[in-house]
Image (spheres, rainbow, N blue to C red):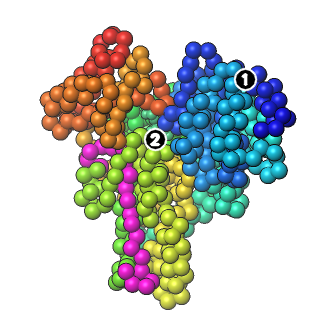
Amino acid sequence: MNEDQRSLFLSSSSHFPPPQGVKLSYGTSGFRADASILKSTVYRVGILAALRALKTQSVIGLMITASHNKVSDNGVKVADPSGGMLSQDWEPFADTLANAHDPQHLVELIAEFVQKENITLDGTKPVEILLARDTRPSGEFLLEAAKQGIGSIIGAVALDMGILTTPQLHWMVRARNGGMKASETDYFKQLSSSFRCLVDLSPSGTHANVDDKLVVDGANGVGGEKLEILKTMLNGLAIEVRNSGKEGGVLNEGVGADYVQKEKVVPFSFGSQDVGLRCASLDGDADRLVYFIVPSTSSNKIELVDGDKILSLFAIFITEQLSILNKEIDVKAKNGYQCQLGIVQTAYANGASTDYLKQLGLEVTFTPTGVKYLHEKAAEYDIGIYFEANGHGTILFSEQFLCWLKARTTELSDVAKGSEQHKAALRLLAVSELINQAVGDALSGVLLVEAILKHMGWSIERWNEIYEDLPSRQLKVKVVDRSAVVTANAETVVVTPPSIQEAINAETAKHPRGRCFIRPSGTEDVIRVYAEASSQDAADNLAQSVAKLVDQFLGFGSS
Ligand code: G16
């Protein structure tokens, strides 16, 4: 590292001392904490993003968001050149950087890393970092800190893309690196035109829900406002957006996908007027999506149509299209293709959903919580569908399969234009354009759900009936140190502290169809408890008794 660069680091980092007595870690989805202590972390992630851009010689993204967390929190994460999450090999360096105290030590750490990674810091090959933030007020000063971090690397240029949903930024990074147009307008154009294409390909007479209104809860975050823009570019889909943030509500408070999924009650501004309508909820930065039904005017309870059901709907549609496409074709012949379709879930997936998917003959695998793990696994298939029960997920298409599909579509348009096979090929291509290939995206997800429901002629009730969820309950427990819990087998077994797993097993065995696990959250300072059983009372009791165990083993002993 040359002297100019060293003194630039020293002078800028002296303005960003890290908070005292706090150890930050690049968790499930980047760093998250109370916004008031994050300035130095965001500055350092700015440095990291610039180094990543130099290392990969590609455009990198930096997003300031705490997604589903409360409004006073914030966070920061990096999008890699593919548009996906930061490569996990760089996470330890992110932790070291965030927790380095003395500016001199910080500079030494960077110098060592740069040498190890063979990164040239002479400014001869300039790189760009796209920045965006959600609607949190703290995003403004944190964005400045990110710019300072990027500005402290010679040759790194920060481009402020403004207020975006997290998936929009990931999409832009991917598009830029793929040599495509990557403005927000391009994003909306791609989504709306592929949606239109899918709707136009729906079998005639199946538009049962075409005139129904979809009512969307925007979590008082960025998604509602973006959906309002997207809506103007769509025909044939009536959307009403509530909780867009303009009405003065608080981000994620009594609203949004996380609240709706965990509490299973109507979000603020929804109620008896919505009985019989299709309702959906986005989270604060619009990377999660769940649907719900308001079943009666007399209660605030909802019927949740969660990420597992969205996944199942997508799986049904894709399987149907693949089977039409391959009809009367030997997939092993010269013009055939044996498409590997795989499903990826986490331990939170409702047991009934996994049974259902397996009954459809699909291969289902499990990873730990966090899109970074699910995405990586899904990318191993030609078509990988991944979803967390909380509504975070997407469908990935391999380059190889897309290449074959495009060639096959051209071939079919020459010899069998308008045939069912040709339409199936066109539909699969449209899905690959509509659904975000970089990360789970509530806006593209909502359009794909709507297009598939139209295609099937299904109401939300019909969709919800594909299987019946096992009753479940999620709780969170505050503990002294959540890192004391270490899990294995896709988070289904606790290995540390010893003996808690035996106690959990003993509780679980008391309940028919009981299943229960605990894990440390990577976005909140809590241990999460998930329980499922044959009745709601049993699931509630199991969750309560395991939460007590967590408190006894690790907590403050308040239970
Ligand atoms: C993030 C991750 C999700 C994860 C969720 C909860 O969502 O992207 O993959 O399921 O956190 O994680 P944890 O249980 O570790 O707190 P979001 O919507 O907050 O970005």
Badge number at residue 370: 2
Badge number at residue 103: 1
CB-based contact (under 8 Å), mark 2 and mark 1? no
Badge number at residue 28: none
Residue stretch in magenta:
332-353
Residue 411: give x, y in percent of width and height: 52, 85
Work out whether mark 2 precedes mark 1 in sequence or the reverse, and give the earlier one: 1
Identify which amino acid the numbered label 1 is placed on. Answer: Pro
Residue 375: give x, y in percent of width and height: 47, 51
Question: SS for tag 1?
Answer: helix
For image coordinates 38% across by 46% down, the residue present is: 367
Report the label total.
2
Q: Quadrant of the N terminus?
A: top right
Residue 244: give x, y in percent of width and height: 59, 37
Question: SS for tag 2?
Answer: loop
Residue 60 within the magenta-colored segment of the rendering: no
Which is more toward the observer, 536 or 77? Answer: 77
Q: Main secondary structure of the magenta part?
A: loop
Q: CA distance from mark 2 to mark 1?
A: 32 Å
Q: Quadrant of the C terminus?
A: top left
The answer to whether residue 192 is above or below residue 91 is below
For image coordinates 58% across by 22% down, the residue present is: 34
For image coordinates 24% across by 24% down, the residue present is: 499
Q: Quadrant of residue 314?
A: bottom left
Identify which amino acid the numbered label 2 is placed on. Answer: Gly
Which is more toward the observer, 247 or 222? Answer: 222
Q: Quadrant of residue 337?
A: bottom left
